[in-house]
Image (cartoon, rainbow, N blue to C red):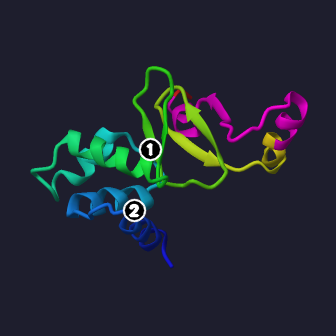
Amino acid sequence: MSALVQALDKLKNMGVRMTPQRHAILSYLLNTMSHPTADDIYKALSPQFPSMSVATVYNNLKVFMESGLVREMTYGDHSSRFDADLSDHYHALCEECGKLVDFAYKPLDELEQAAGEMTGFRVKSHRVEVYGTCSDCMSKTT
């Protein structure tokens, strides 16, 4: 079963009505690796849905977050980014262009357990980010 079908089933079971705009926003999120902002989503879908507003995108993103289908990531002064990949993974952020790239790193998979044992906390999540300059931006300066 595809991720889109699973997400649609989850929303349906939660009583969320599926509008064409909601379907398009969810499809866009599930099919992109770019961690878009709400504005990115709006710009990508507005030719297809001229009456859709940025507020519509934000409202739908809120529904998806409340449904556990999307996570919001904030990075200082940058706009929130949205990620529909809820698997355990980490992010590298380019400080020049804002590009955000997923990566996995096996030694971090046990981080929550180790942190819980060391602190006595019941750890429920963690977030790991690395910052630097992407290869595209580095090649522009040489």
Viewer-closest of 82 and 126: 126
Q: How many numbered circles does the render carry? A: 2
Say which residue appears at 85% left-offset and 31% top-offset: 120
Tag 2: amino acid: Met
The residue most toward the bottom is 1
Tag 1: amino acid: Phe
The answer to whether residue 115 is magenta is yes
x then y, percent, for residue 132: 62, 28
- Left/right of residue 22 with respect to residue 28 in the rendered view: left
Give the SS element for disc 2.
Answer: loop
Q: Dot 1 corresponds to which residue?
A: 82
Instruction: Give the mark nearer the N terminus: 2 vs 1.
Output: 2
Viewer-closest of 141 and 16: 16
The answer to whether residue 90 is magenta is no
Q: Quadrant of residue 77?
A: top left
Q: Which residues are magenta?
A: 113-140
x then y, percent, for residue 106: 81, 51
Say which residue appears at 10% left-offset and 52% top-offset: 50
Residue 37: assigned label = none
Give the SS element for disc 1.
Answer: strand
Say which residue appears at 29% left-offset and 63% top-offset: 23
Residue 14: assigned label = 2
Q: Nearer the viewer, mark 2 or mark 1?
A: 2
Say which residue appears at 39% left-offset and 62% top-offset: 14
Q: Is residue 142 above or below residue 82?
A: above
The residue most toward the right is 118
The residue most toward the left is 51
- Left/right of residue 136 with respect to residue 103 in the rendered view: left
Q: Is residue 89 above or below residue 141?
A: below
